[in-house]
Amino acid sequence: MDNPINSMMDASLESIRKTADANTVIGDPIVTADGTTVIPVSRIKLGFAGGGSEFSGKHAGESKPYGAGTGASVTVTPVAFLIFREGSCRVLPIPEPASNSVDRLIEQIPDAVDKITTLWNERKAPAEEI
């Protein structure tokens, strides 16, 4: 007799195959009005677990009661775009978001410096004109 876990694992793996195929990693090309072709590129992370056990005794006509379970997880994260234009190809990476508050603060420093510099120059310009 085939264990129920085999059919449960087959069903879970089939669902993963449908979700995480090559078209998920390298997406469908998008052609813009000016003829530029953009192709999304993603990273896929998979997690899978399964298990089961036979118990002693008889239950509902089976020789041994059986318990099983499976689970799966799929995470798709965009990582870049391939941009084809006028015979050349560019890779436009998508930066990963900062994982903690300190990293986010460090990422914002260049923008803050630019804003402060712009404000300083705007305040300074009228004084120079006088």
Image (tube, grey):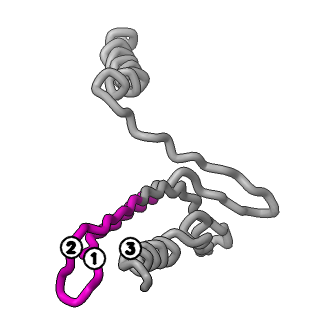
Residue 67 in percent (x, y) is at: 26, 70
Where is mark 2, residue-wise? 57
Q: Amino acid at mark 2?
A: Gly
Mark nearer the viewer, 3 or 2: 2
Vertical order, 59 against 21 (above or below):
below
The quarter of the picture where residue 107 lies is top left
68 or 130: nearer the eye? 68
Residue 97 in percent (x, y) is at: 40, 39
Q: Earlier in the sequence, mark 3 or mark 2?
A: 3
Where is mark 1, residue-wise? 64
Query: Is 58 displayed left or right of 52 in the figure?
Result: left
Res. 72 in view: yes
Where is mark 3, residue-wise? 5
**Overall secondary structure of the magenta section:** strand
The quarter of the picture where residue 116 lies is top left
Is there a contact, CB below 8 Å, between mark 1 and mark 3?
Answer: no
Q: Amino acid at mark 1?
A: Lys
Q: Amino acid at mark 3?
A: Ile
Q: Earlier in the sequence, mark 1 or mark 3?
A: 3
SS label for mark 1: loop
Tell me the residue at 66%/68% (across/down).
37
Q: Is residue 68 magenta?
A: yes
Is there a contact, CB below 8 Å, between mark 2 and mark 1?
Answer: yes
The stretch in magenta equals: 49-76
Q: Residues within 10 Å of mark 2 (few under 14, many from 20)?
A: few
58 or 39: nearer the eye? 58
Tell me the residue at 38%/21% (across/down).
106
Quarter of the figure that contains the C terminus:
top left
Q: Earlier in the sequence, mark 2 or mark 1?
A: 2
